[in-house]
Amino acid sequence: MATAAALQRLVVDCLKSQMPQALPDFRPLEGKYEILRKLGAGGMGDIYLVRHKLLEELRVVKVMQPQLRQDTDFRERFLREARTAIQLRHPNLAQLHDFSVDEDGTAFMILEFIEGCTVEDLVGTPQFSSLRLQVEIAQQALRAVGFLHRRGFVHRDISPDNLMLSQDADGRPLVKLLDLGIVKPLDSAQKLTGTATFLGKYMYASPEQLEAKE
């Protein structure tokens, strides 16, 4: 298995590669959080690194994209992501701290900050050539998937950019599954997408997804 020192170097190198970007004028966070930098963007929202001003703890804020505010389907999906995340507590899942909607309809959620890199960023690096590390990543990812299945959910996007590699308190590899936005409850009568609507990535989709089946 990769040593703690090797993992630490991997995390530091990845964080150095993340260049700062312009910060938004986002008033709902003022007074409580300081926005540090943009981390990326997803299908439903932009993601920023923030610091809690009182607790001095780093967290992540995911803000719904402005053009989606009037889209009822996306607003419901964003809210469902928060409702799903808050009830799914597992060491290998990213944890939700808070969720809110401001006066103009902008929804945002506060998530734990995971210091590390996605598996997509790691592929091709010397450290990732370790078979033991690859097996460890796979095992922990499957624990997250198994937990979701036992709770009656399917994720639909288990791909390298949705798996973060970090370290636990003892310096051991810790994998976190991200993006619960397209998690689907198997027993829900409410369907936000039709049977023929594809969500996820073609390279990592299940056969039934590609065939537009349940």
Image: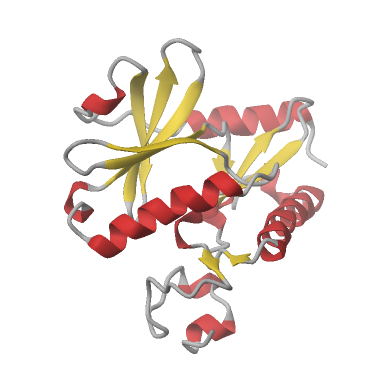
The reply to whether residue 179 is visible in this rendering is: no
Q: Could you tell whether 182 is left or right of 204 in the image?
A: left
**How many numbered discs, if any?**
0
Query: What colour-coding does the image apply?
Result: secondary structure
The reply to whether residue 117 is visible in this rendering is: yes
Given the current orientation, which residue lies at the most extreme top position?
A: 54
> What is the x, y in percent for residue 103?
19, 36
The quadrant of the picture occupied by the C terminus is bottom right
- Residue at 24%, 61% in the rendered image: 72
> What is the x, y in percent for residue 146?
73, 61
> Between residues 209 and 82, which one lies in front from this camera angle?
82
Q: Quadrant of residue 35?
A: top left
> What is the x, y in percent for residue 82?
45, 48
Q: Is residue 66 above or below residue 10?
A: below
- Residue at 65%, 44% in the rendered image: 89
> Between residues 88 and 119, which one lies in front from this camera angle?
88
- Residue at 82%, 50% in the rendered image: 132
Q: Could you tell whether 180 is left or right of 102 in the image?
A: right
Q: Quadrant of residue 39?
A: top left
> What is the x, y in percent for residue 119?
59, 50
The quadrant of the picture occupied by the N terminus is top right
> Between residues 162 and 82, which one lies in front from this camera angle?
82
